[in-house]
Image (tube, helix red, strand yellow):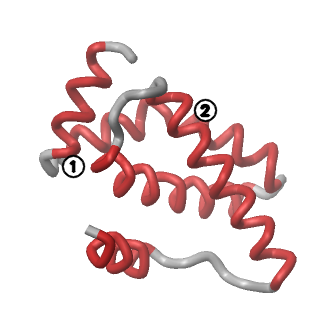
Amino acid sequence: MIEQEKVWIEQIQKGDLEAFRKLMVRYQERLYALIYDFVGNPQDAEDVLQESFVKIFFGLKHFRGESSLATWMYRITVNACLDFLRGQKKGKRMVDWETHRQDAEIRT
């Protein structure tokens, strides 16, 4: 993991939203391209990207650096894509930000 990312992770774990914004800027194009390959639709790709960043934000609280940050984020994003595609098959809609926030608070 590069040093700047280590600093951002520490800052994010302390609640620094600006550090998270910087992390998003660094990775959003790569993650969007990955998601678009899965879902094939720009609007759905944007939705899954947002969903991925929500999961990444809350997951960073527990990130220990056992893998590279990029690999960890990639895995979360792939899982978000698979969740989205499963939801499409079942006719379900994606969960919104508020639901994720509440779920994360309950688990902590």
Q: Which residue occupies 69% across, 62% down?
A: 43
Q: Local crowd at mark 2 within 10 Å, few (<14), some, or many (≥20)?
A: few
For label 2, the residue is: 30
Q: Quadrant of residue 25?
A: top left
Q: Quadrant of residue 6?
A: top left
Q: Quadrant of the N terminus?
A: top left
Indicate left or right for 41 with 26 as reference: right
Q: Check disc 2 and report its element: helix, strand or loop.
A: helix
Q: Which residue occupies 15% across, 51% down?
A: 15
Residue 10, image x and y in percent? 19, 34
Residue 90 is tagged as none
Tag 1: residue type? Answer: Leu
Indicate left or right for 51 with 54 as reference: right
For label 1, the residue is: 17
Residue 94, image x and y in percent? 62, 76
- Could you tell me how far apart the alpha carbons at marks 1 and 2 are, in whole angstroms? 21 Å
Residue 26, image x and y in percent? 43, 29
